[in-house]
Amino acid sequence: MSNDLIKCVDFCGKCKQLFKDDVTYTCSTPDCSGLRFAGSMNNQHLKKKQHFFATIPLSNQLVEITDRLQVKPASLTFNTDGVPLYNSSSLWPVVIVINDLPPSQRFATQNVLLWGLWQGIGKPVFRPYLKPMVDELNVIYKQGLDCSIGRIYPKLTVGTMDLQAKAYVMEMTQHNGSHGCLTCEEPGQSCQQGKGTSKGYPFREETPTLRTTESILDNASFALNSKEKYVKGIRSESVLFDIKYFDPSESLVPDYMHGVLLGTTKQLLCLWFDKGSKEPYNISKVVKDVDARLSCIRPTDDIPRLPRKLEGTKQHWKASELQNWLLFYGIPCLDGILPRPYFDNFCHLVTTDIYASWGHYFRF
């Protein structure tokens, strides 16, 4: 990809709004005195950049990949996440993958689209940051792109982010705040955890009210036009609603890695094998028996890492190791060791996760 395609987009350091053309030095937001370049008004002609992010047009990347692989892309997934750098500085890339490619090609470096790169102190304001991408996605879907194998009309269908990034993009409260769930309007409640508290969502018989596009936009409008900072967890309208065909309330999928693997699965390992607990489900005294079974497992070739023992290492397990434990190792290693009610409950989690993850391959 040519460096000539990289575009630097300037934004106001005070109100965070984009500069709409290439010649304006002063911010167009009413009552905002922000300047485009570093220094005073007398130094604007020097064009020393200060607040900007870099983008690469999606259209060029999509055409190049389509022509090279001879596959028509129809569905796209986007992701963004923060990468800490130094002195409170962070990097926020926005990447897109083509869902129509097989996984072996889908996540290959040469087939992943890098749309944007933001670097600075703190976190970006996502409405101005993602606005150029949203506008381009609308144009691509409406007008299409000419490729060697014909005209393509790819559209964004899925967004995947961790809970923090999702809250920033969706203009809502964080996951540890009231109404922090994007799926429903359940407020949650504070629960004791260790020496502090965390936000929990206790089981209830009645089904909570699910969020919809209409309810999110109504809450955002009410929050913007009232003195309330948040209305049912929503504070403003997300830029993703500007994508004409995209429904963020349904298309931003749950964070499987942090929620199921690094969250639930890792917590279960701690409850079962942390020393000092007298709970009936704690089996830390027989962890060596579980490790003996684990060491006998020989995974298939598609699992590159051999299982590590639990004792002394479980707190360092990566998400992929936790997934292998949940899907493949856990049941044979715990059968006859974990008390039956807790073992049966774990089996329900495993079968539910297998169906959610692999149900399109198998029939249950």
Image (cartoon, helix red, strand yellow):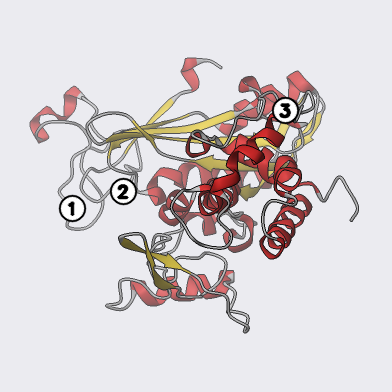
> CB atoms at circles 2 and 1 under 8 Å apart?
yes
Q: Report helix, strand or loop for mark 2.
A: loop
- Labelled disc at residue 303: 3
Q: Position of residue 159 (x, y in %)?
A: 59, 48
Q: Residues within 10 Å of mark 3 (few under 14, many from 20)?
A: few
Residue located 71% across and 36% down the image = 293
Identity of the amino acid at label 2? Answer: Gln
Give residue 32's mark.
Answer: 1
Q: Position of residue 284 (x, y in %)?
A: 54, 47
Is tag 3's residue or tag 2's residue first in the polypeptide sequence? 2
148 left or right, relative to 6? right
**Image quadrant containing the C terminus:** bottom right
Crowding near the residue tagged with mark 1, few <14, some 14–19, many ≥20 C-alpha atoms within 10 Å:
few
| Quadrant housing residue 76 | top right
Q: Is residue 154 visible in the rendered structure shown here?
A: no
Whether residues under marks 1 and 3 lie with C-beta atoms below 8 angstroms apart, the answer is no
Up the image or down, 249 lies above or below 86; here it is below
Please state which of residues 94 and 185 is positioned toward the viewer in this rendering. Answer: 185
| Residue in the image at 74% along x and 41% along y | 328
Q: Which residue is mark 2?
A: 17
Depth check, mark 3 against mark 2: the one in front is 3
Camera-side residue: 54 or 291?
A: 291
In the rendered image, residue 340, in percent from the top left (x then y), is placed at 72, 61
**What residue do we see at 82% from left, 26% from top?**
149
> Mark 3 is on which residue type?
Ile
Residue 155 falls in image quadrant: top right
Left or right relative to 179: residue 72 = right
Q: Residue furthest toward the right?
A: 363
How crowded pointer 2 is (Cα within 10 Å; few <14, some 14-19, many 20+) is rated as some
